[in-house]
Amino acid sequence: MAQKELGKQSVKFKNPPFIVGAASIVGEKEGNGPYGRYFDQIITDPMAGMKTWEEAEEHFQEMAARMAIRKSSLKESDIRYLVAGDLLGQLIASSFGLMNLDIPIFGVYGACSTMGESLAIGSMLVDGGFADHVVALTSSHFASAEKQFRFPLGYGNQRPKAATWTVTGSGAVVISSVRAGKNVRVRGVTTGKIVDYGIKDSMNMGACMAPAAADVIGQSFADFGMGPGEYDRIITGDLGKVGKDIVIDILKAKGYDISANYMDCGIEIYEEDQNVQAGGSGCGCSAVMLTGYILKKLEEGSWKKVLFVPTGALLSPVSFNEGKSVPGIAHAVILERDAG
Amino acid sequence: MAQKELGKQSVKFKNPPFIVGAASIVGEKEGNGPYGRYFDQIITDPMAGMKTWEEAEEHFQEMAARMAIRKSSLKESDIRYLVAGDLLGQLIASSFGLMNLDIPIFGVYGACSTMGESLAIGSMLVDGGFADHVVALTSSHFASAEKQFRFPLGYGNQRPKAATWTVTGSGAVVISSVRAGKNVRVRGVTTGKIVDYGIKDSMNMGACMAPAAADVIGQSFADFGMGPGEYDRIITGDLGKVGKDIVIDILKAKGYDISANYMDCGIEIYEEDQNVQAGGSGCGCSAVMLTGYILKKLEEGSWKKVLFVPTGALLSPVSFNEGKSVPGIAHAVILERDAG
């Protein structure tokens, strides 16, 4: 067994990397939600001054990356790798958005679990001695995602109760081998498998993703020998109200009760009256909640340890139209306060 | 500087991982080409017995992964991570194709440079002590790619001279911390940046990718202090005939003459009379040439050291239709024979 392998699917870092910078850029609806005051910047124009929604999303990623680097007091030339992805086909928000940074890049895709994947890979690159500083980031945009996956916005289709609203926003973190006065470390990660319960409803992605979330959370508990009680929060990405109940139920059947300290970024990010049905979703959802809120709670000491579990639904317009199911994936990241 | 960082963009492995298994599965046209006898399996039915082209491509990936693992004498449960991607939106060939393997997965996207990206990340996971065995793989399929990026096949559009033909095939390698009787090692990698010369012609991807290839090859020479003469071959992924001349010219201007030992998988994989214009392309192109031919030349000792440089064109149907350019990316991997 390799030196850092732990249990079936986890790794424990020898020198847990620090998160030394973070940035959250959101749209107007997210800014009007209950966490609006936590985000670094609210861009009220859905086009962000650009010509297309895709360019707007690219702009969000570029802004988030540059701001996270600036907040870490590093220069762009100090960053060894970008680990980035988004929901759009062929990751165009990342490719076009991050081109001008002139930094070597690994494109990653885990649907809305992408922040978990980029954090995991970025942390391994740092702990493995391949880089001192890595930026991990992702984004989503309501309009570019609807255009990619569902109906033309102008069509004004009805949204069922189980539907979620794609968050417009980008979150970026700088992962570093040196403390630089910061105190949140990535202790370890549990990498998810693809889990398919055969659900075919792209308007009920919470149900598609919940089994994968439960699978990786349960595996993380087993691998690290740490149950729900040892975390201040267990935080999924964007299961929404439907997925929340399912993940709690599946984990209960596995012998873990997470209901007391469970939260879901998708449920949190909007108010009940913001007309978002089951909650928020998209890569940007967990990314901006991490960079805007979760890291701050850890930094200030309100929380000591968090299991952060971005959740993804693996579908494409092609696979959906060909009648395929929507499998899920989720990656778990242990974030811990270490006052040094 | 982290312990394995080398120069501006490269890493040098402390314990260079071994490639202990490889598999190449191709379609009929590739089987009829000059390298047909090197590939492990030729599937003459473009649907591979499935219902859609996408399912066929998924099947290619699953077969390649399972065969590579079998050839490495490992069990699927020995594999710690899959690092996989493809050209299709939201990586459906990988997600659906690899679901049944029940192995933790990192989805990656670097367009046709994906084999370079998955080799780089997979090797870092092994050298970093996070895994003993990783499978890196990718695929492409002529028909699913044409449907995704260009014209409906039934439309029978003319193909300009600069166009390339997407390879139908999947290549997979098992990257391992232990020799297991094998002799090809991954010595180091140079990770590419996105390079955009502003070219907008998706029918001339060689020109789009060549600047990125030249950039990463030149940087690799500089970082490792090894010029073209130290490699038996410098092998790009799918620049084709147009891109080939450009990459040689740009590198000449940087002071490196690679013309004597340069080859391009896209030029090699088909015969002149196979009606493929500038050559082959697609993630599968460099992946099957690596697993079918290049690794064998290294294993048998005909070659000692190779710089393997898969090349990618970053476009999507959306970005292309919105009039954006086609930026390029490439990743360089040093493969070396080490008889032990």
Image (cartoon, coloured by chain):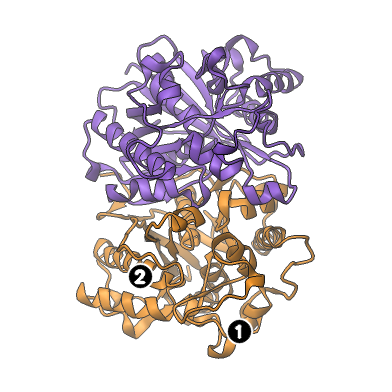
Chain colours: A orange, B purple
**Which of A163/A284 is in front?**
A163
Q: Residue at x 64, y 83 (%)?
A: A37
Q: Compared to B323, does B139 lie above or below?
A: above
Q: Earlier in the sequence, mark 2 or mark 1?
A: 1
Report x, y in % for residue A8.
25, 54
Instruction: Please name whichever residue, B97 or B80, is drawn nearer the observer in this view of the structure.
Output: B97
Amino acid type, mark 1: Gly
Residue A327, picture quadrant:
bottom left
Residue A77: x %, y % from top left: 68, 47
Q: Position of residue A52 (x, y in %)?
A: 73, 60
Marks 2 and 1 in Cβ contact (< 8 Å): no
Chain of the residue displaying label 2? A
| Residue B48 seen from this side | yes
Count numbered badges in the picture.
2
Residue A33: numbered disc: 1
Question: Crowdedness of circle 2 by 10 Å Cα count: few (<14), some, many (20+)?
Answer: many
- Rounded to the nearest angstrom, the CA distance separating label 2 from label 1 is 24 Å
Classify mark 2: helix, strand or loop.
helix
Q: Amino acid at mark 2?
A: Ala
Say left or right for B69 vs B247. left
Secondary structure beneath label 1: loop
Q: Is residue A60 above or below residue B187?
A: below
Q: Quadrant of the rendered structure where residue B139 is?
A: top left
Q: Which residue is mark 2?
A: A210
